Structures are given as C-alpha cells and as structure tokens.
Amino acid sequence: MHDPASIISADDVKRAPEGSVTFIDIRKQPDKEQIRGSLRYDGAKLLEAEELALPLPRDGKIVVYCGSGNSCIRVAARLREQGFANAVALEGGYAAAKEAGLPLEELSQQQPIPGEETAGIRLV
C-alpha cells in the first residue's frame, strides 16, 4: 500500500496556513477550475523525467492532486525521491478538495517541465 504520511486529507489542507502549501494539479481531464494557486503539470511527464529540476520549494509542503486521488500518490512519491521531501498526495483528489470547500479559481495553463524537449506550454 502506501505510507499514511504520504497523503493528506482535504480538511487538513484547509487548516494549513494560507500560502504554506504549493499545489500541483496533474489531472488529465480537468474541468474549468483548479484549487487556488495550483501549478498544472503533466503527471506522466513528471514520472518519466530523468531528473526533476522543478521551480518548487524543496523543503516546503507540496500537495499533488489528480481527479480521484490515485495517480497523485505515484507522482508525490516521485517528487520525494527527487528531493522534495514534503510532497504528499491529496486523498480523494480534486473531488475531495471541491467537496471540502477549498478555494477554487479558473484553470491555468500547464507548466513546462524543465529540461524536456517539449517544454513549451500547452494551452487548455
């Protein structure tokens, strides 16, 4: 299974001080909204990249979410392997965040993964 410390509930995220969490949205088929302040990345590319030189805080809390909470567990584990020690998966994914009432905003553009040949930004 997975280490319980590698996941976080939407309620726990809601209680975190504002600005203390970096959100990564890896949903393949996002709707028109995301958790406020999220960075969008292609989850498959995060798993495939040889080395992740992402512009993220290595010691900060990073919460990865997908649609239902399954694929984000693997991506959070990959981030931890790459030195982002506090990367966790959002239990229940975006659906749980929305249900918990986390603040949402309009969907943003997908971010490039540094070092990838296809590092251009893809519009939604």
Image (cartoon, rainbow, N blue to C red):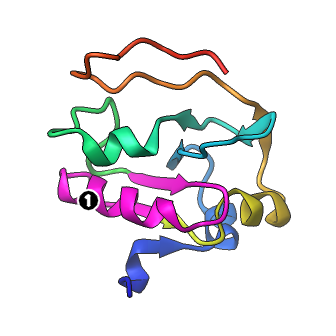
Neighbour class for label 1 at 10 Å: few (<14), some, many (≥20)? some
Seen in the picture, residue 92 relative to 41 is either above or below; the reply is: below
Horizontal placement of 95 versus 65: left or right? right
63 vs 109, nearest the viewer: 109
Which residue extends farthest top?
120
Horizontal placement of 85 versus 31: left or right? left
The magenta-colored residue range is: 61-88
Q: Amino acid at mark 1?
A: Arg
Residue 51's spot in the image, x, y percent? 16, 39
Under tag 1, what secondary structure? helix
Horizontal placement of 119 versus 9: left or right? left
Seen in the picture, residue 89 relative to 114 is either above or below; the reply is: below
Q: Quadrant of residue 68?
A: bottom right
Residue 93's spot in the image, x, y percent? 64, 62
The residue that disc 1 covers is 80
Q: Quadrant of residue 85?
A: bottom left
- Magenta run includes residue 120: no
* Residue in the image at 81% along x and 57% along y: 98
Instruction: Count numbered badges in the picture.
Output: 1
* Residue in the image at 27% along x and 23% along y: 114
100 vs 95, nearest the viewer: 95
**Looking at the figure, which quarter contains the C terminus?**
top right
* Residue in the image at 79% along x and 39% along y: 31
- Magenta run includes residue 82: yes
102 vs 43, nearest the viewer: 43
Q: Quadrant of residue 16?
A: bottom right
**Looking at the figure, which quarter contains the N terminus?**
bottom left
Residue 99's spot in the image, x, y percent? 84, 65
* Residue in the image at 54% along x and 68% along y: 70
Horizontal placement of 76 versus 63: left or right? left
